[in-house]
Image (spheres, grey):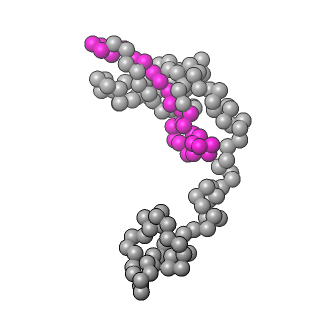
Amino acid sequence: RAVSFSHHKLTPSALAHCPRPRRKSGRISCEVATRSDSSSPSSSYSSSADVTSSDEAVASSKIGARVKVKVPLKVYHVPRVPELEITGMEGELKQYVGLWKGKRISANLPYKVQFVVDVEGRGAVKFFAHLKEDEFEYL
């Protein structure tokens, strides 16, 4: 709903949101769109997206686990290596990105896994890959 501040006390924050105040007979008038509390962004989420504490506990208990890639998979983002086959490589589960601020999000590859590979002339290089749960097995 639009609110005219011609009859209200003008605060500095209200003036900051006013693109161009117009003067009418010695008064400053500014039209600002406001929303009611029922249309706030936090209430627009459906309750089905809420995550229970048991879901969070299950996701956090997996962090730090050793995993092994079990499907044919290549990555192309390792420095000084044009293409790297990570099938059979072991890594450490570092993060579950399917939860954000207590809400379940639709991450396609929700598990962030850290790998270490030996690159000739450089030594051990750490890199991350995002995987689905069916692409690796727990050790």
* Residue 76 falls inside the magenta stretch: no
Q: Position of residue 70 (x, y in %)?
A: 52, 24
Up-down: is 41 above or below 77? below
The residue lying at 59 percent from left, 43 percent from top is 101
Q: Position of residue 91 (x, y in %)?
A: 50, 20
- Judge whether residue 138 can be spotted in this image: yes
- Judge whether residue 71 can be spotted in this image: no
Give the quarter of the figure containing the C terminus.
Answer: top right
Report which quarter residue 7 is drawn in: bottom right
Up-down: is 41 above or below 30? above
Q: Position of residue 69 (x, y in %)?
A: 51, 23
Give the quarter of the figure containing the N terminus.
Answer: bottom right
17 or 6, nearer to the observer: 6
Span highlighted in magenta in the image: 96-122
Up-down: is 8 above or below 50? below
The residue lying at 56 percent from left, 45 percent from top is 106
Q: Position of residue 37 (x, y in %)?
A: 63, 64
Report which quarter residue 53 is drawn in: top right
Up-down: is 122 above or below 75? above
Report which quarter residue 118 is drawn in: top left
The residue lying at 39 percent from left, 70 percent from top is 19
The furthest residue to the front: 26
* Residue 104 falls inside the magenta stretch: yes
The furthest residue to the bottom: 25
